[in-house]
Image (cartoon, rainbow, N blue to C red):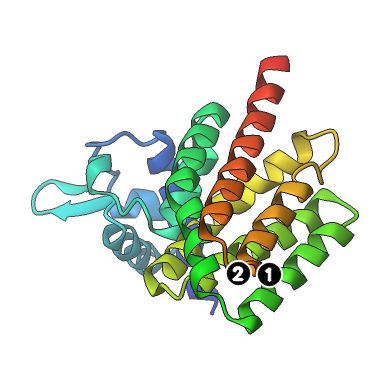
Amino acid sequence: MAARNLHGHVVQVLGQRIVSGAIKQGEVLPPEATMAEEMDVSRTSLREAMKVLSAKGLVEARPKVGTRVRDARFWSQLDADVLAWRCASMPTSDFVQKLSEMREIIEPAAAASAARHRSVTQLKRMQVAFDAMEASHDPESWTTADIDFHEAILAATGNELLISLFSVIETALSSYFTMSAHTAVNFKYSLPQHRTVLQAIRDKDPEAAHKAMVKVISDTKENLSSKRRKA
């Protein structure tokens, strides 16, 4: 377990350095012995970490060259770790823009699909999450309930690909929702819009659900943009 934790630590440190640009694309990493000494880990832990980074597309080993950082186009951009490192390292404005765009593409269509396909049990799950949002007393509990609400909507589509996609982007969305909650004067500012989404899905009205989700996303984007303009 200690060895696993050590190589996991190396993965996190090197992954963050690569994705942030501290270690440049195309750069050859130092020799194994040098890196192991610098990070105070065994060569075995370092090798295991390199296997993980290689599987994520960040590095490749070449004979007579060594381990080289690959171009970003080869990175597994939807890998949970890579996505988290990228979101943590990119400027806030870029993070907001890219996550908003991704949400605009995915979530309104998912809300419409949920309105068509949701079961009574799935609707109850959305209601429970909404009630938790309504009862939340701080931005942290709000964010947790907000994530649950949006996950419940995607689950109600019955589309395994969408459900899997949410599990990949959940870390990024959590950061996005937390940022929004902390920048708002009232972190529950979007509760009425979420209620409208829930009602449309309850009524099995795909068009209204789509429209309501677009409003949720645009209001969140505007909240974050307004905060940046005032800063």
Badge 2: few (under 14), some or many (20 or more) residues near its Cα, within 10 Å? many
Q: Earlier in the sequence, mark 1 or mark 2?
A: 1
Query: Which quarter of the image is occupied by the C terminus?
Result: top right
Nearer to me, 125 or 164: 125
Marks counted in the figure total 2
Q: Residue placed at 56% from the left, 44% from the top? A: 214
Residue 91 falls left or right of residue 74: right
Q: Quadrant of the N terminus?
A: bottom right
Outermost residue on the bottom side: it is 121
Seen in the picture, residue 67 relative to 215 is either above or below; the reply is below
Looking at the rendered structure, the kind of residue marked 2 is Ala
Residue 93 horizontal/vertical position (percent): 54, 27
User: What secondary structure is found at the residue carrying circle 1?
Assistant: helix
Q: CA distance from mark 1 to mark 2?
A: 6 Å
Which of the pair 230/92 is nearer the observer?
230
**Left-right relation of 169 to 56:** right
Query: In the image, residue 169 lies at what x, y percent?
Result: 49, 56
Residue 190 figure quarter: top right
Q: Residue at x 58, y 81 (%)?
A: 119
Residue 33 in the image: x percent, y percent? 33, 54
> Which residue bears the numbered disc 2?
152
Quick one: 132 or 122, which is closer to the camera?
A: 122
Q: Residue at x 36, y 36 (%)?
A: 23
Lateral position of residue 178 relative to residue 100, left or right: right
Residue occupied by mark 1 = 126
Q: Three-letter amino acid code at disc 1? A: Met
| Dot 1 and dot 2 residues touching (CB under 8 Å) | yes
Of all residues shown, which one is farthest toward the left? Answer: 64
Circle 2 SS class: helix
Q: In percent of the image, x 60 and y 69: which residue is there?
A: 152
Residue 152 appears in the picture as rendered: yes
